[in-house]
Every structure is written in C-alpha cells, then in structure tokens.
Image (cartoon, rainbow, N blue to C red):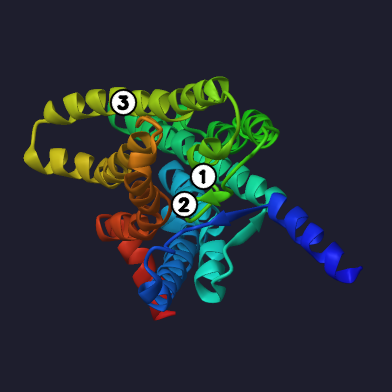
Amino acid sequence: MHHQEKPLEDNLTELMEFVLLGFADMPHLQWFLFGLFLIIYIIILMSNGTIFLITKMDPALQSPMYFFLANFSFLEICYVSATLPKMLMNLGTQRRGISLVACATQMCFALMFGGTECLLLAAMAYDRYVAICNPLRYPLVMNHRVCIQLVTGSWTIGIPVLIELTYQIFSLPFCGSKQINQFFCDILPILRLACGDTFVNEMLVYILVVSFAMVPFLLILGSYSKIISVILKLPSATSRAKAFSTCSSHLMVVVLFFGSAIATYLRPNTRHSEGIHKVLSLFYTILIPMFNPMIYSLRNKDVIMALRKLLCK
C-alpha cells in the first residue's frame, strides 16, 4: 500500500515544482561558480552597505543626490538578494527544485526591484537636471519633501501592477517540461512553459517593459540632452569638468543597466535566444550591482573623502 502511494506523492510534488537549470550545462564548474558568486554577493553587500552607511552618517553627504544614492544602494542589496541566495543554494546542493509559490514570490520581487531601479534612476536624473540646469532654484525644487515623494513613488508605484501580473502568469496551466532555463524565476522563460495561448500575457509584459523601462530611459535621455547642452555652454573647461563629474557616474550606470535590461525583455521570445537572455540577465541582476559602488566611489571625491573618514575612525 505504501509503495503505491509514494509515486502519487512524488508526481504531486513534481506538479507543484519548477526546476531552475541555471548552470547545469557546466557540471565541472559548479563549485567554482558557487565560490565566484558567493564572493560577488559578499562584495555587493559590503560595498553597497558601505555606501548606504556613509551617506547616512557623513554630514557632507546630506544633499538630495546622496539621499537618492543611499536608496539606490539599499535597493541594489534587495534586488540581488531576491535572486542570488537561491542560485547559491542550487549550486551548493545541486537541488534545483523551487516550489510554485516560491517561484512566483521570487519573480514578483525581482520585477518590483527591477521596476523600482528604473524609476529611481529617472528620479536621480531629474535631480541632476535641476542641479545643473536650474542651480538657483535647486534647494527650493529638490526639497526634502519632494525627495521623499520621488523615492516613495519609485518604490511603490509598480507594486499592485506587478503583483497582478505575477498572479495572472502563475494562474496559467503549465504542461510538459517544468525546467526553467535560467538561474532565477524570470518572466519570459516561465511563459515559455505555459500551455495554450500566452499572447495576451506577453503583450502585458512588453507594455510593462515600455512603461517601467523605456519611458524612464527616454526621460533620462531627455534630461541628459539638456544637461549636456548647458554644460557645453559653461565658460571654462574647469567648470564644465566639475559639472559633468557630478552626473557622469549616474550616466554610466544608466547605460549599463537599461542597455542590458531592455535588450533582454524586448528581444524576440524564442528558445534560440535563451543563452543570450541568461547572460544579459546575469549582467543586470548581479554584475551591475557589484560595479555600481565602484563607479560612484571612484568617480566622486566626496564619497572617497567620506570613505577615508570612516576607515580612519
């Protein structure tokens, strides 16, 4: 009797689980990848945590620009923590199963943090626009209340939409393979596993990508076109260099993040693009959060001074 019941339980478990393939096609590199990504995760936590700490503690870093940077660093920690711990667990244990509920939760948080990053980068671009194009009105326009509203809006505006999208996708029937060719529960690989017509769901994904990625990206480009035109009109090379240094770090992050994210989600959703999709998602979910603190600290004298003060204590 017991021998007959066990396969039924196993089948039920299979139906309630997905399998994250991740880097299963490289079995000889599993422990190397585990060590590499563990080091990257520690670097991300420590570097972004340090940026967050110094922007809160140092009196010289209390301007709106560093208020946004503190939120951005905290967001990077959250964003990476939505995907990387599960990937490390899969690499370390070689158990790649993830329950339907856990998969939905991971995807929802990854989408929310990704959408928040797009909006927060747009808010940071607006801050730089006001600072350079309207410097006399900057303290009035970018007061503490406005900064709080921009950050709160960036964190919360996408939550109800993305929860509804996640619910719709995981309400679809899944048949055949439950293997997700990705290292986390990403929206496009999951849609490939759904039965029936997913055209409406795919259109919703593209609409959300346009709303949360393309629109902020175009607003950022518009801000920077005006910023660059103002900088070029400055009388001296020193003043031009100083003005550009305050926004060059942010511009680098924008190009890296939006370039890889938009290329991932606006590419045709075919099985031939799965490898490229995985590499691009690895880039914007893990590598860019590791590089961001380096970009901001190495190109910002105020951050370097605050780091020296912290290390000398």
State the image quarter where residue 214 is shown. Answer: top left
Q: Residues within 10 Å of mark 1 (few under 14, many from 20)?
A: many
Q: Which residue is mark 3?
A: 223
Q: Residue 151: in sight, yes or no? A: no
Q: Quadrant of the N terminus?
A: bottom right
Q: Can the viewer see residue 269 in this picture? A: yes
Instruction: Indicate the secondary structure of the residue bearing disc 2.
Output: loop
Label 2 sits on residue: 182
Compared to residue 205, the image places residue 280 above or below, namely: below
Q: CA distance from mark 2 to mark 3?
A: 35 Å
CB under 8 Å between discs 2 and 1: yes
Tell me how far mark 1 sits from mark 3, CA to CA: 31 Å
Name the residue tied to disc 1.
186
Q: Amino acid at mark 2?
A: Gln
Alpha-carbon span between mark 2 and mark 1: 7 Å
Vertical order, 211 against 159 (above or below): above
* Left/right of residue 272 with respect to residue 172 in the rendered view: left
Q: Earlier in the sequence, mark 2 or mark 3?
A: 2
Q: Residue at x 34, y 24 (%)?
A: 218
Instruction: Assess whether mark 3 and mark 1 are in contact (beta carbons under 8 angstroms).
Output: no
Q: Residues within 10 Å of mark 2 (few under 14, many from 20)?
A: many
Amino acid type assigned to the residue bearing label 1 in the image: Asp
